[in-house]
Image (spheres, rainbow, N blue to C red):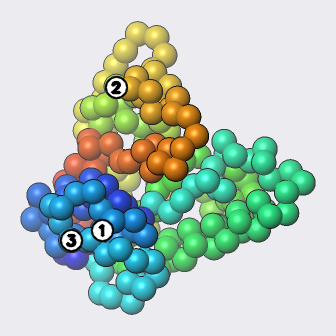
Amino acid sequence: MKVLVACEWSGTIRDAFIRHGYDAYSCDLLPSVSNYGPHYQCDVRELLTMPWDLMIAHPECRYLANSGVRWLQGNPDRLEKMITAAKFFKLLLNSNVPKVCVENPVMHKYAIHFIGRKQDQTIQPYEFGHPESKRTCLWLRGLPDLKPTNILHRDGPWDNQTPSGQNKLGPSKDRAKIRGKTYQGIADAMAEQWGEHQ
């Protein structure tokens, strides 16, 4: 099984699939911080004609996420960037790869309109062994829903995203990069469950 993890600099999901015996590669405009597995530093569109069995993609959410919808009002430049981001998202979702998961935070209604459909599933880190709440949406094609592997329970509300302060990071060039890193429990679940569906 040949796996492409698109828009991933960390290697978290790629390495999880490799540990489970799959031929997995990551791709991002940034170099990979993990030397464990192979990484293409390029635009993922250059790789979509290759024969992949599964692609898990993490396109940039800045212009698609519901948290940024207020910046669209009266901002034609931002609107144009949102349309471009939605087209890229849709390109990944509708690629020729037989099995696809595209991940993003909760989207605003304008992005959903351009993409053409809502997510298939919403997951939380606390369903996969991490004591945080960070709602993540999955658009799936040819794949089953990801099943929780280690649901944690707590009295009272969950910490907002991470107790380590990931959600409180100030503006910096690495802010989006740090906030976008996949939780290990989610990566392991993808490799364990979707690797079985060859």
Circle 1 sits in a helix, a strand or a loop, which is it? Answer: strand
Circle 3 sits in a helix, a strand or a loop, which is it? Answer: loop
Taking the image as drawn, is residue 154 in sight?
A: yes
Residue closest to the eye, 33 or 1: 33
Residue 35 point in image, percent of width and height: 18, 61
Q: Which residue is mark 1?
A: 26
Identify the amino acid type marked 2.
Pro
Q: Which residue is mark 3?
A: 38
Q: Which residue is mark 2?
A: 131
Disc 1 to disc 2: CB gap under 8 Å = no
Identify the amino acid type marked 1.
Ser
Residue 165 point in image, percent of width and height: 44, 27
Is label 2 or label 3 in front?
A: 3
Looking at the rendering, in which quadrant would you find the N terminus? Answer: bottom left
Taking 153 as reference, is 89 left or right? right
What residue is drawn where x is 38% and y is 53%?
145
Name the mark on residue 96.
none
**Quarter of the figure with residue 79:** bottom right
Disc 3 to disc 1: CB gap under 8 Å = yes
Q: Calculate the distance from the C-alpha at mark 1 to the C-alpha at mark 2.
A: 27 Å
Taking 112 as reference, is 12 left or right? left
Circle 2 sits in a helix, a strand or a loop, which is it? Answer: loop
What residue is drawn where x is 45% and y is 60%?
58
**Quarter of the figure with residue 183:** top left
Looking at the rendering, in which quadrant would you find the C terminus? Answer: bottom left
What residue is drawn where x is 38% and y is 48%?
181
